[in-house]
Image (cartoon, rainbow, N blue to C red):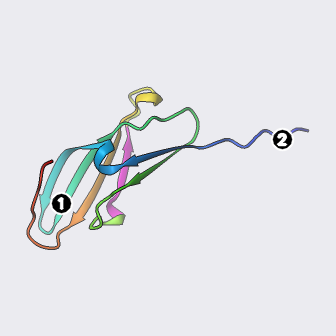
């Protein structure tokens, strides 16, 4: 009996700032919820998405990645939604 070769996982590396776009910001008392959208190049099968450059004030338990299942895999949108904790008055900058 022959063994099937192990399935290879496609690794996609994204930089938070350059590979995604902020689509929504909601401010709360001491918190902000940020929604970013990116379009990773996913392949059929397993995909591992690695996102670098996330803010250091991100609350890890708030991080959600929500895929859009309405589009084909090669053009799937991925929504990154996370909360930031304020370390002082909010200062929003647009670049």
In the image, taking residue 71 as reference, residue 1 lies left or right, namely: right
Q: Is residue 65 magenta?
A: yes
Q: Which part of the image, by quadrant, shows the N terminus? A: top right
Element under label 2? Answer: loop
Q: Position of residue 81 (x, y in %)?
A: 29, 51
Q: Is residue 71 left or right of residue 23?
A: right
At x 36%, y 49%, the residue is: 15
Residue at 40%, 52% (x, y): give it. 51
Of residues 43 and 79, which is closer to you in this image? 43
The total of numbered circles placed on residues is: 2
Residue 90 as seen in the image, left or right of residue 79: left
Residue 33 location (% of width, % of height): 21, 56
Spatial separation of the CA atoms under disc 1 and disc 2: 50 Å
- Return the residue at label 1: 32
Q: Position of residue 78 (x, y in %)?
A: 36, 41
- Secondary structure beneath disc 1? strand
Q: Which residue lies most toward the right here?
A: 1
Mark 1 / mark 2, whichever is N-terminal:
2
Q: Which residue lies under the disc numbered 2?
A: 3
Magenta-colored span? 61-67
Q: Residue furthest bottom?
A: 87
């Amino acid at each position: 009996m022959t063994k099937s070769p192990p399935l290879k996982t496609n690794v996609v590396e994204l930089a938070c700032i350059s590979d995604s776009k902020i689509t929504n910001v909601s401010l709360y008392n001491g918190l902000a919820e940020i929604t970013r959208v990116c379009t990773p190049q996913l392949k059929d099968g397993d995909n591992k998405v690695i996102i670098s450059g996330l803010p250091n004030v991100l609350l890890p338990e708030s991080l959600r990645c929500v895929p859009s299942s309405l589009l084909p895999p090669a053009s799937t949108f991925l929504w990154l939604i996370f909360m930031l904790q304020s370390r002082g008055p909010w200062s929003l900058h647009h670049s």
